[in-house]
Image (tube, rainbow, N blue to C red):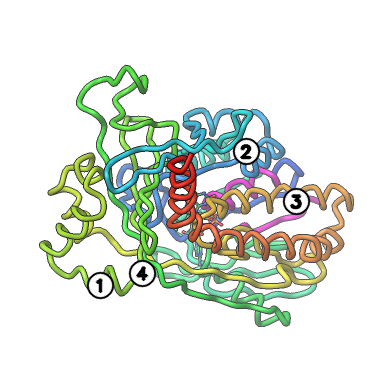
Amino acid sequence: MTETVNVIGAGLVGCLTAIALAKRNFEVVLFDYRLDPRLKSTNDRNLRSINLAISARGITSLQYVDEQISQKVLKDMIPMWGRMIHDLAGNQESQNYGLFGECINSIDRSVLNNSLLDELDGFSNISVKFGHKLSRIQFSSAKQNCIFNTDAQDQVSFEADFVVGCDGAYSTTRSQMQREVRMDYSQEYIDCCYIELYIPPAEAHNAEFGGPFQISPNHLHIWPRHNYMLIALSNGDGSFTSTFFGPWSLVESLDSRDKIQTFLTDNFPDALKLMGPDTAIEAFERNPRGALMCVECNPYHLEQGRAIILGDAAHSMVPFYGQGMNCGFEDVKVLMQLLDKHEGDRSAAFDEYSLKRHKDLVSIIKLAKDNYKEMSHGVTSRLYLIRKKLDTL
Ligand code: FAD
């Protein structure tokens, strides 16, 4: 008999999970509390960054799940061969990621999410229910009963053989599982706020960059200033999504337009010019201020193959290593490999997943935290040392 699964969360990881399970002949129902983001009427701009760096970890995981789908959903990504460091004087210095053309890639979050959602439509054994907010799960040895609040203000429940929680850092699936299993859990806010800013396209085609880009589209741009930094990743239309990261006390001390203007002019004069000073100051003042949080837990599943959490629900990490989504995609790959290895024995696959995956996830969460020092400070120190050395030659 066909087994049924409720996948909670139609974000990046939930969509890939639904595809991977549908390809293994499960009957999948995918839920999200949002409305369908592809509908024009949905004005649901996520606070999170609108473009992401996707790396080999994420790409190979997408390819593992479905080569053709990966080609389609990744067709607009822009390769970034290295970092471009912008110093205070406006000098730019390219630092390649590798000797052999290794790169990470910039991709629009909503384009990727919407393309994955489009792919779900091609599977007769996936149905998607937007406007359904998971509130509770009644676990049992036979069926798992998921209870949702819907937009119509009523409660509905859906039973399935098992549940996969891909419902992000504040996961309800996780908190429901914590009532059933002695799950170690920690949540840590780091003292860093992020604000999204925007660099518009150039007014004309820029022959050097092959498009209307004001700066190189093939670099991850960093304005490192030790305690804080600005970064920018390119978009296909010639614009860049830029993100400021800095301590909360600093951001909160910039409590007037004048202070923001002085701060940006003193620290990021070239970036301010690229953004347009008025727009940048207004965006800095008005745009939402995001908090950054790390979540660690263990195990990631309930025994008897009843439930498992993947993606940010299981491991939220700071974005400085650009690996949150990439790791979430890898979770899906690792889980599918184990389901295949155990020939569909979910219980054995989930047990081995928690056992095998925890060490890797703890390591990457730590690497992500450490990379803040590298991006905001290390890159400049190294430059400084190299320059100093050259000066003495
Ligand atoms: P989410 O994207 O959070 O999706 C969860 C989904 O679950 C949402 O659609 C939500 O609506 C739904 N949901 C939540 N609760 C419920 C509920 N109760 N009922 C029903 N539905 C629910 N990662 C990278 O790999 N590269 C990067 O460059 C990168 N840059 C980043 C920059 C910033 C500033 C930030 C904050 C993060 C960045 N990340 C990056 C991390 C990346 O955004 C996350 O790891 C990724 O979005 C996780 O995907 P997910 O599907 O697990 O969770």
Callout 2 amino acid: Ile
Mark closest to the chain's N terminus, 2 or 3: 2
The answer to whether one can see residue 124 in this image is no
Kindly identify which residue carries mark 1.
Answer: 252
Tell me the element at label 1: helix
Residue closest to the far front: 393
Q: Nearer the viewer, residue 388 or 239?
A: 388
Residue 247: mark in rendering: 4
Outermost top residue:
207
87, above or below 164, in the image: above
Q: Is residue 220 above or below residue 213?
A: below
Magenta stretch, residue numbers: 1-20
Name the mark on residue 87.
Answer: none
The image position of residue 231, as x and y in percent, is 38, 48
Name the spot of residue 174 as percent of width and height, x first.
61, 72
**Distance Cα–Cα, label 2 vs label 3:** 14 Å
Residue type beneath disc 1? Glu
Q: Nearer the viewer, mark 1 or mark 2?
A: 1
Residue shown at 22%/43% (left/top)? 275
| Amino acid type of the residue tagged 3 in the rendering | Val
Q: Cβ of disc 1 within 8 Å of ligand 1?
A: no
Picture quarter containing residue 24?
A: top right
CA distance for labels 4 and 1 = 9 Å
Which residue is denoted by mark 3 in the rendering?
Answer: 334
Instruction: Tell me the residue at 55%/29% (across/down).
Output: 72
